[in-house]
Amino acid sequence: MLLVYYKLYITHTLAGFLFDLDQSNVNRDIRYLEPVVSSCIPLPQKLYNLTRRLRIVEEVEIYFPGFKAFIDSTEQEIPRPKDKRKRKNYYSGKRKKHTVKIQYMVNKKGTILHKSSQHKKGRQHDYSVYKDEHPITPPQVENYCDLGYYGIEKDFPYLKAVLPVKKRRNIELTKIEKRYNKKHSRQRVIVEHTICRIKKFGVMGSRYRNRLNRYDVMSDIISSLVNYSIIHSKKR
């Protein structure tokens, strides 16, 4: 029932009809199932705790193939808050909607190695999200980001950050810079593919209808299900 609900994001009324349950029991059963499922799948936090303890180069390469990590944030629409202050804080100027934001770090295979422990308000900038809760990677690993993280090289000089070349006012990029940006985008697209996998689950891809205090639990489980799918598809 939990997987059907996450994938299709049906109403509790329809879920009760499909699984022969009273509507009032659907939410209760989902809450019972969530910790059980969480204990069986690779949560990003579990993987991140492992990567924090890596010391040998061979171990680092297992979790970071090619010694590369890819970081990006994504937003999800939420209903318009009733409180005026919340409306302002959750309004995303980029999406022109009220949203919540989550940051992900994936490796070259698309496996999610880090996810924001708490969702952020849609008004918050991607780089501000990163500064609040940035993943720590081994010194050998290059962190690929987009221009939304401009300034990371200055604020985190010890980090191997790789960003595209930013266009300067009234100055066109050279052919070499354009080729570099294109190559950078081709490599960084892996994080976009992983986010796309996450959004195939209706609970993450459509307008979020549940209480926000449930958002982090649900997003953790969805990220873990995506990890499970990626890890086991590589073993076939």
Image (spheres, rainbow, N blue to C red):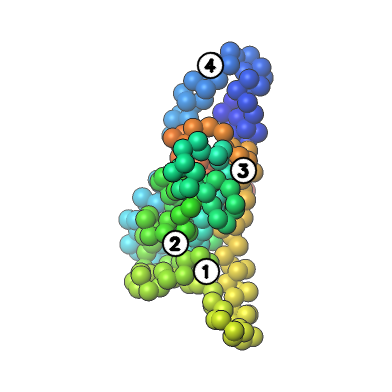
Crowd band around label 2 with a 10 angstrom C-alpha radius: few (<14), some (14–19), many (20+): many
Question: What's the distance in space between the residues labelled 1 and 2, CA to CA?
Answer: 9 Å
Residue that carries the numbered disc 4 in the rendered image = 25
Question: What's the distance in space between the residues labelled 4 and 2, CA to CA?
Answer: 41 Å
Task: Say whether disc 1 or disc 4 marks the residue closer to the N-terminus.
Answer: 4
Task: Say whether disc 3 or disc 4 marks the residue closer to the N-terminus.
Answer: 4
Label 4 amino acid?
Answer: Asn
Crowd band around label 1 with a 10 angstrom C-alpha radius: few (<14), some (14–19), many (20+): some
Residue that carries the numbered disc 2 in the rendered image = 127
Crowd band around label 4 with a 10 angstrom C-alpha radius: few (<14), some (14–19), many (20+): few
Crowd band around label 3 with a 10 angstrom C-alpha radius: few (<14), some (14–19), many (20+): some
Residue at position x 53%, y 67% in the image: 146
Residue 166 quadrant: bottom right
| Residue 63: assigned label | none
Foreground pick, 29 / 155? 155
Residue that carries the numbered disc 3 in the rendered image = 205
Q: CB of mark 4 within 8 Å of CB of mark 2? A: no
Label 3 sits on a secondary structure element that is: helix
Label 2 amino acid?
Answer: Tyr
Label 4 sits on a secondary structure element that is: helix
Label 1 amino acid?
Answer: Leu
Percent across and percent down for residue 19 are: 63, 18
Label 3 amino acid?
Answer: Gly
Task: Say whether disc 4 or disc 2 marks the residue closer to the N-terminus.
Answer: 4
